[in-house]
Image: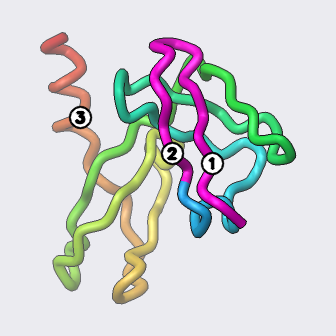
Amino acid sequence: MEDLEITCPVCGEASVVLAEDMETLEVGDVLECEACGAFLEVVSLDPLEVEVTEEGLEAFFVDCPRCGYTFEVSEEDRGQEVECPECGFRFIPDWSEVDEEDEEW
């Protein structure tokens, strides 16, 4: 499989999807345009087609309270218990800092 180039429907800039990323890519996955930051949902794999998604998947990084490992959680995890990929500890992340940032905008 080869690297593929996609054109962002928002800004028209080309982005490359690496061959190794194509192997795990699934319909419904969301990519972010490197040029403008638009969220692009994969709607077809053969051929690779994307469309702008309204919501995107906002994410932030949390530190595991048990082992200190930093990992990413997405907006869809809000209010949900997450599991640290390093030690397996389960906890509910504190979204208060993200909510404060949203209020500043």
Q: Amino acid at mark 2?
A: Val
Q: Nearer the viewer, residue 86 or 50?
A: 50
Residue drawn at the location 32% of the way across and 55% of the way down: 93
Q: Amino acid at mark 1?
A: Leu
Q: Which residue is mark 3?
A: 98
Q: CA distance from mark 3 to mark 2?
A: 30 Å
> Over which residues does the magenta segment extend?
1-17
Percent x, y for residue 12? Answer: 50, 16
Q: CA distance from mark 1 to mark 2?
A: 6 Å
Earlier sequence position, callout 3 versus callout 1: 1
Q: Which residue is mark 2?
A: 16
Residue drawn at the location 65% of the way across and 33% of the way down: 41
Q: Residues within 10 Å of mark 1 (few under 14, many from 20)?
A: some
Q: Residues within 10 Å of mark 3 (few under 14, many from 20)?
A: few
The answer to whether residue 21 is magenta is: no
Q: Cβ–Cβ below 8 Å for labels 1 and 2?
A: yes
Image depth: mark 3 or mark 2 in front: 2
Q: Which residue is mark 1?
A: 4
Q: Cβ–Cβ below 8 Å for labels 3 and 2?
A: no
